[in-house]
Image: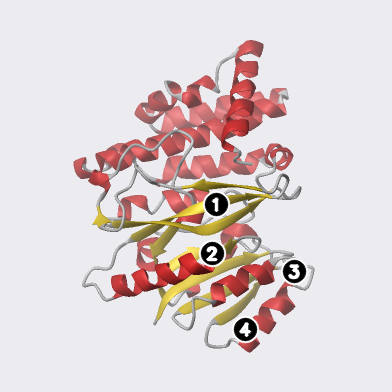
Amino acid sequence: MKLITFTVPCYNSAAYMEKCVKTLLTAGPDAEIILVDDGSKDDTGAIADRFAAKYPAIVRAIHQENGGHGEGVNQGVRNAEGIYFKVVDSDDWLDEAALAKVMAKLREFAAMEKPVDLLLCNYVYEHVEDNTRKVISYRGILPQDRVFKWSEIGKFPPSQNILMHSVIYRTKILRDCGLELPKHTFYVDNVFVYQPLPQVATLYYMDLDLYRYFIGREDQSVNEKVMVKRVDQQIRVTKRMIDAVDLYALPVNQDKLRAYMLNYLGMMMVISSVFLTMDGTPAAFDKKRELWQYLKNHDEKVYKHCKFSIAGACNLPGPLGHKLCLWGYSAARKIFKFN
């Protein structure tokens, strides 16, 4: 059995995937790298096959009809032989020095009677447009360098969540929660992180800048114009998260997890509301009303929490409300540089 499976969903990634794979190879023979060629039209498949032929004990290439990023992740979860599992997008990469320390820690976990369920590390926004970096860490929020439970976490600021870039799940957790990401849908990394959280009993945080998140390509899914165009997929993901977990059924010892997940879901409502407002068409405003009604119909307590939070400020009626929503988004984008 492998210590960790890295799954790399690839679609027309020939121009940049090699950098990603080469950093993962430094994890050595304890790692498994699954390259999922998602029906690419360039040389992605051939590059994946070349890596698999050169490193047959480490790299596997899977070729599938185009199913989107989520189906690439699904393939990884289905085929993973690693005790732990991490998704790395093909245009991103891992810091090699930090990865060596992570692998050593995972070996310790694997030797435990009950291995840790979730390891978290920092991630770094690598902005191509101005060649700057922004480190997202969990210092002061999560206990460092020891096993802990949800009852010991601090409060997350509105600008920060646990994202796909920061997590290494125990593979069994992903399977036990029945994770199955929707096909042909962007932004499913939110479901990937969110849905398994209640299954997690033990966590560990290493203050290492492991994941390097490349941001700034014009065709990237988090590009503002692209997000407006794909807002229906954002709505689909938000609804999937609404349905995934009954937050008020979580036990008392997960009160802090509930609070965190409520804020995460609220931020998803913010994102959907902002980009529907940015669209500005009557159809978009109808979709925004329908999304908020969907949340209310699902769970009125969760709806009220979101209504009286930052999310509710993004759902104010009328032209002034719409302007305030977009002004708030613009200010946050300049401060936090999240896309």
Labelled pair 1, 2 in contact (Cβ < 8 Å): yes
Q: Is residue 85 above or below residue 333?
A: below
Which of label 1 and label 3 is nearer to you?
1
- The kind of residue on which mark 3 rests is Ala
Answer with mark 1 or mark 3, whichever residue precedes in sequence: 3
Whichever of labels 3 and 2 marks the residue nearer the N terminus, that label is 3
| Label disc, if present, on residue 124 of the rendered structure | 1
**What is the x, y in percent for residue 255?**
25, 39
**Horizontal side of residue 146 vs 28, given as left or right:** left
Q: Earlier in the sequence, mark 1 or mark 2?
A: 2
Please name the residue that numbered disc 3 is placed on.
14
**Which residue corresponds to mark 2?**
95
Label 2 secondary element: loop
Camera-side residue of 241 and 143: 143
Query: Label 2 to label 4, Cα distance in Å?
Result: 22 Å
From the image, state whether disc 2 or disc 4 is nearer to you.
2
Identify residue type, mark 2.
Asp
Sequence-wise, the earlier of marks 2 and 4 is 4
At mark 1, the secondary structure is strand
Question: Closer to the observer: label 1 or label 4?
Answer: 1
